[in-house]
Image: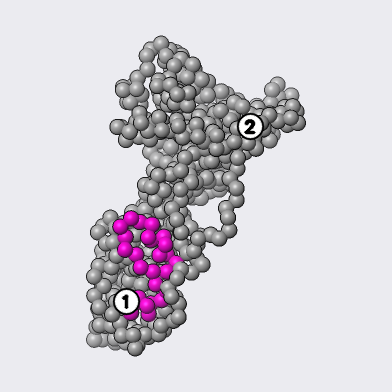
Amino acid sequence: MALLGLNGHIIEVEADIGQTLPGFVLLGLPDASLNEARDRIRSAAQNAGLPLSRRKLTVNLIPASLPKRGSSFDLAMVMAALRAAGDVRDTGGTVFLAELGLDGRLRPVRGILPAVMAACKAGYPDVVVAAANETEARLVPGVRARGFSSLARVALEFGANPQELVLDDDDGAGSPAGSAETAEAAAAPDMRDVAGQVEARRALEVAAAGAHHLMMTGPPGAGKTMLAERLPGLLPDLPDDQAMEVTAIHSLGALRPGTAQLVRRPPFENPHHTASAAAVIGGGSGFPRPGAASRAHRGVLFLDEAPEYERRVLDALRQPLESGELVLHRTGGSAAYPAQFQLVLAANPCPCGRAVGKGADCSCTPQARRRYFGKLSGPLLDRVDMQIQVQRLSVAELARPEPQEDTATIAARVAEARQRQQERLRHAGFATNSEVPGRMLRGPLRLSAKVTAALDRAVEVGTLTARGYDRVLRVAWTLADLGGRSCPDVDDVGRALLYRQQLQSP
């Protein structure tokens, strides 16, 4: 399998043994790591007890016009060579995905889940992988995955003479690289830990219920980061299809190959403000790889100290916020990665962070304030549904904090609101209010002129764009769902409009 993003293409591996001088020729646009496979598979076959022919061996990867990269082709190439020599029987359309060590052992590779998904979709459900990747491969419904510890055991499975093979004593169990984590995950942050901030907590609940983008501005230490870190805990578990998408992306970018189970919880990505565009959006030299925006698919992308990011990084988020997908073009090819995430931005009121109230303690010049917020372009902020102020905590809130609702209580209300949205939008193919297009808001879900009067005035005077008009309506529908109402009323629309217009840039 050759992966281009999350899309896979079946690669047919041919091998021919010629009558000329010894040699090994690899055809089909291989990259440097794939060219190195010639020496790897010769040593692996030798140590497995099935040395390759000393005559000229030609291996061709079809289609030849598609660039190939990585070490996952090792096992398929050596099996084709052994078949050409008559050492194994016909593999019968089996897909081989594993890297070979010089000792003949099978090593795990990245991207097994999307590769196996693509193989099954193409009609090739029989897959052979390294033992450390077997659990991950079996996550795909309908696949017949077999995991092996060494090339010798794979050859034995496909009819090699056991008298010639060098078999180890390994029973084929997964190596530590593919086993599940034994250490328990750290406890998830709880909303009970956030002191005060009644309005901000309510806004976070609304954002979670409708999957709305959120920006928080306020002085340092007010709790913006604490609130953002607790947003994933309010979101419901991912259904099977979404969990498969998220796990496939994480399989591609995993530092250690091997995934034991589907990712059910919405991911949370928090890149540092010094991160490059390639780190946040994706890319890199050669073939583009997913960035933090794609790893946050179906979850939360949190940009703390948002005005400190490079402007080109922030503006690059505008396209996935609209389409839910990132298409990356590089010299090594182009790749499309899903990037349907909730964006959460946090910012101080000024560079020094003391422009609170009358701002008497602030030492920033007006130019510095404009330059600080100037990195957050108007088109980007126009795509953020809710923009709220997080106020500084009082001494009373810190000294005698009132009991706060925990994450589980709020998450239950969010789940009920999500259920109402799914029932209302199921016929249109949407799951949350944030996905509803404008044609539906002005068509089947159209509100009366009396309810939208405040919105209409805001558009007339130019304080609200057409995009903002739709986003306010989406938040209003979420407020109605949280309140158990079948349709937004004037108060819901007014509160949604207030969420949108709270932030006043300097």
370 in magenta = no
| Magenta-colored stretch includes residue 155 | yes
Dividing the picture into quarters, in which one does residue 120 lie? Answer: bottom left
Which residue bears the numbered disc 1? 157
For mark 2, what is the residue? 404
Q: Is residue 45 visible?
A: yes
Residue drawn 71% across the image and 24% down it: 359
Q: The residue tagged with tag 1: helix, strand or loop?
A: helix
The mark closer to the camera, 2 or 1, is 2
Residue 398, by quadrant, is: top right
| Residue drawn at x 66%, y 31% as measured from the top left | 403
Furthest residue in direction top, as rendered: 450
| Residue 185 x/y as whole percent | 57, 53
Where residue 259 sits in the image (x, y, percent)?
45, 59
Dot 2 alpha-carbon crowd within 10 angstroms: few under 14, some 14 to 19, many 20 or more: some
The span shown in magenta is 131-156
Marking on residue 14? none
Instruction: Work out whether residue 118 or residue 266 is closer to the camera in this orientation and state it.
Output: 266
Pinpoint residue 203: horizontal percent, then vertical percent. 54, 28
Tell me: residue 380, above or below residue 240.
above
Question: Is 87 situated above or below 245?
Answer: below
Let me know if residue 66 appears in the view. Answer: no
Quarter-of-image position of residue 417 = top left
Residues under labels 2 and 1: Cα distance?
60 Å
Residue type marked 1: Glu
Cβ–Cβ under 8 Å for marks 2 and 1: no
Single out the residue that lies furthest toward the bottom: 163
Picture residue at 46% right of the left edge, 48% below the top: 264
Residue 312 against residue 422 in the figure, above or below: below
Residue drawn 49% across the image and 63% down it:
179
Secondary element at tag 2: loop
Q: Amino acid at mark 2?
A: Gln
